[in-house]
Amino acid sequence: MATAESPFAAFAAELDELSAQQLRRQRRTRTTPADTHIVADGRAVLSFCSNDYLGLAHHPLLIDAAKQALDESGLGGAASHLVSGHHLQHARLEQRLQAFTGWPALSFATGYAANVGIIPALVGREDAIFADRLNHASLNDGCLLSRATFRRFAHQDLNQLATLLATTPARRRLIVVDGVYSMDGDLAPLPELLALAEQYDAWLYVDDAHGLGVLGEHGRGCAEYWGLHHPRLIQLLTFGKAAGVQGAAVCGDALLIDWLLNRCRSYIYTTASPPALAAALCVSLDLIEGGQQRRETLRAHIRQLREGCADLPWTLLPSETAIQPLRVGSNEETQKLADRLWQRGLWVPGIRPPTVPVGQGRLRISLSAAHTEDDIRLLLEGLHACAREWQGGTPDYDSAAHSSRLTTGAD
Ligand SMILES: Cc1ncc(COP(=O)(O)O)c(C=O)c1O
């Protein structure tokens, strides 16, 4: 009997094409908690691939808060916020966020959901969006969903942005940027962007997924870093990265928050996240605010890495944040370098198109306050060994011996 062809057979050729271009995605399965030393696919590795920039994802105080709230509040959100899902823990989190940012807040289940819902609630067909070309995919998706005119300016090109703003006939104007660019690690110049927003009567939407916890004396993110408290600023914080949990919140003018509560579809038409996560997040915000020592450790790691990479054949992009991208180039070279490091017991993700522009493949090294000086040294040793191999030397590592130095538990 002939095997019935899959109704999705057309995808097979396209997947093969992705493989041929070194663009096929695959997952590794982690069997240990999110930490710097982990086990994935049965292999003990040192991780430079998480966004847990302060090392809070496995912090005992967060875990205790979640456990206690699980006992008191149960597990599931059970309904959307506007029906019966809004729990006291969510309300407490929003109050805590107001104290943290100085603005009313509305919490979401994820940053992706927030971005794809908030932007279409702010602007529509008669309006225009002006977005940096390197914005995160969730922002781009939100912009497309809004049906507003969607204009993208070259990365950090404020002259181009000013020209676009000066010539738009749109009713409402929304500038959209990342506070810290997720694949480049550089910062959007918020004071200049706000000046343009004022000049052209626009709003400024800033996705601070990678600034929260890392930037500013109290880790309050890019608004604190730049010293801004501005009514045109709409801040999106996400909680799956430095905050070590899950979720997001938009913070801004009280009228804006009330509008979103009434009009943001990804807030209205989804189940509230488990209240225990909100309880853990309140503790996380305390740890972030008092986390000067963690941020100092992170900055020391950034300095150590940048000094140690100076003589590599690949260049680190200019970045003062936890995201330290090492520019490689082609998909093949990027993947080969990531694979070699993995064989040495170092997990550093190779980032390829469409996440970054074609020809700009890179290793996205992400650092955490939970790393040690020795961890950074091991990474630098691995990168230099690869550089020698690339420059014609022979591989000088024994991957099994190397990974046993990194053992974090049985695999
Ligand atoms: C800049 C940026 N915005 C939004 C998101 C999405 O946030 P979440 O993971 O909470 O959905 C990410 C995460 O990858 C991000 O890097």
Image (cartoon, rainbow, N blue to C red):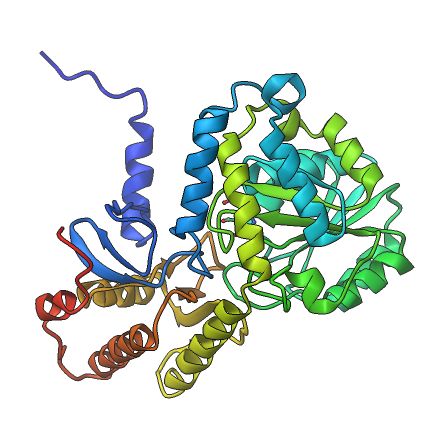
From the viewer's side, name the closer residue of 3 and 311.
311
Left or right: 109, with 236 as reference point: left
* Residue 372 position in % (x across, y down): 34, 72
x 53%, y 48%: residue: 283
Q: In the figure, 247 relative to 81: above or below? A: below
Q: Quadrant of residue 344?
A: bottom left
Q: Position of residue 35 (x, y in %)?
A: 33, 56
* Residue 124 in sight: no
- Relative to 110, 375 lies left or right: left
User: How many marks overall?
Assistant: 0
Front residue (pair 397, 240): 240
Instruction: Give residue 342's quadrant in the image.
Output: bottom left
Q: Hey, which residue is sitting farthest bottom in the picture? A: 311
Q: Which of the two residues, 386 or 259, is positioned nearer the viewer here?
A: 259
Locate the N terminus by quadrant: top left
Say above or below: 79 vs 172. above
x, y percentage for residue 151? 72, 50
